Image (cartoon, coloured by chain):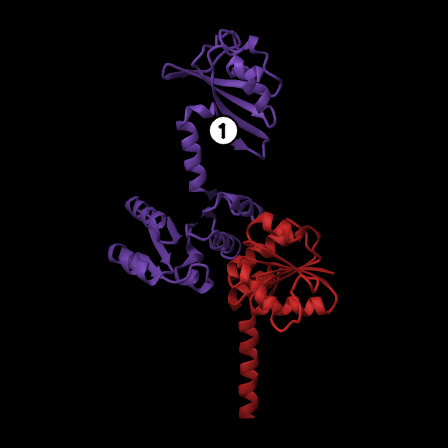
Amino acid sequence: MYVIVVGAGKVGWNLARELIDKGHELTVIESSQRRYGTVEEELEHAVQYGDGSELWVLERAGIERADMVIAVTGDDEDNILICQVARDKYGVERVIARCNNPRNLDHFELLGVKPAVSATDLILRLIEHEVPKYGLIHLLDLPQERLEIIELEVASGSAAEGKTVQELGLPDGSLVISVLRDGSGFVPRADSGIEAGDEVLLVLDVGLEDDVTRRFAPAASEAA
Amino acid sequence: MFVLIVGAGRVGSAIAKTMLTDGHEVSVLDEDPEAIALLERGQDRGWEDLGGSFTVGTALEIDALLEAGIERADAFVASTDGDNTNLVIAQIAQRRFDVERVVVRVLDPLRAAWYRQQGLLTVCPTQVAIEMLESAVREEVA
């Protein structure tokens, strides 16, 4: 596969190494002369100097025959533009953009640049996953399907403790898809029991989060 | 007509002043609070006293665009110093806010030409200069 990576920062450079290791043909485009010099010592002819949002620079890098373009500069506008022209002007089948500011994700979507990868967002999610006080973890939003998948820890003294899945009385549009207990997981049946300390994965229609979360929270916070 | 101008450099501020003088309602958005100085240069009163409005914020921030009144804009001018910024915000104005008339300044002739084909009203000062210079040279020779 022939891949063009625009931006040879930490992300771009490491990505380039990985892709070369995996045997792909690759060109990295870097617009800072200084950075270009550093990266060129290692990657040699696989790096080109220039502004990757300039069409002639992309053409010089052979965008017409690229199978994939990955835009990982520090500028969201540049990443959007590069992916847009790669796909719409040059017919590149797969484009991936880095989104530096998660608040810009809407713009990527509006302009049809998918997927947009936001490192800040990923790290935030990791932190949420590591910090138990959040209680509820958003694992996945599927906005087009209007579904979300969440993870909850069953609190001691909560309404759910000691009940079976059936007895939970979950609202329509919600479903327990898996229970993690003592390091292993299982797909529960209607008569499977729920214990305090279990981590429960649920798939929900958008908007049911509060109703569902309440049942797994400690009794005190339910009163509050 | 309500005109929103993003980027108050030489170009943006000149358009803003003309539009205001022509009796239009004009709102200007720029990330630099000092940019208002360009709008007030050569005027006897402050920009806002003249009836213009000015918002400080970056062009990609939806909140800033909203504050500057994009929802009721009839015309939108993208005139920041970044081609890519201009092309992105112009598409946001067109697709998300349905602004009727969207004008984009793009210095790079290639990008200007391609996005024009895609339905954006791009104006390329570089291309205009090239054409003027070429015809000036021809006249000299003739």
Residue A203, image x and y in percent?
A: 54, 23
Q: Is residue A220 above or below residue B117?
A: above
- Chain painted red: B
Report the label total: 1
**Hey, which quadrant is residue A183 in on the image?**
top left
Relative placement, left or right, of B58 versus B102 is left
Chain identifier, colour purple? A
Residue found farthest to the bottom: B142
Tag 1 subunit: A
Vertically, is A194 above or below B90? above
Instruction: Determine whether, in the image, residue A183 is placed left or right of residue B118.
Output: left
Residue depicted at x 50% and y 30%: A140
Instruction: Name the residue beneath numbered marker 1.
Output: A138
Question: Which of the 4 image quarters holds residue B78?
Answer: bottom right
Q: Is residue B123 visible?
A: no
Residue B60, image x, y percentages = 55, 52
